[in-house]
Amino acid sequence: MLTKKKKPEPLNIDTPRTYLKGFPEMKGRIFKRGGEWFLRQTDEVQTNLNYKRRPRLE
């Protein structure tokens, strides 16, 4: 599996309380770093599985 981490997206908000009133599903994704608020992006997961067809057992 290949996992690509996405960079956090900066938010132009003073407090997350007002932002979360409009978007309550973002509750666990907002964090503060260096005095600024960020929105944590979800990672992109790509699988690289190869399937082989096996002969039937009779």
Image: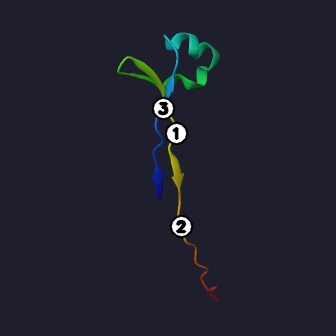
According to the picture, the residue beneath numbered tag 3 turns out to be 40
Where is residue 9 shown, x and y percent of the image? Answer: 50, 30
Where is residue 23 shown, x and y percent of the image? Answer: 62, 20
According to the picture, the residue beneath numbered tag 1 turns out to be 42
Q: Which comes before the other along the chain, label 3 or label 2? A: 3
Where is residue 22 shown, x and y percent of the image? Answer: 64, 16
Q: Secondary structure at mark 2?
A: loop
Give neighbour class at mark 2: few <14, some 14-19, many 20+ (Cα, 10 Å): few
Note whether 50 is above or below 6 in the view shown: below
Amino acid bearing label 3: Arg
Residue at horizontal 55%, vertical 72%? 50
Where is residue 6 shown, x and y percent of the image? Answer: 48, 41
For the rendered model, the colour scheme is rainbow
Q: Which comes before the other along the chain, label 2 or label 1? A: 1
Amino acid bearing label 2: Leu
Q: Which corner quadrant holds the C terminus?
A: bottom right
According to the picture, the residue beneath numbered tag 2 turns out to be 49
- Marks 1 and 3, how far apart at CA: 7 Å
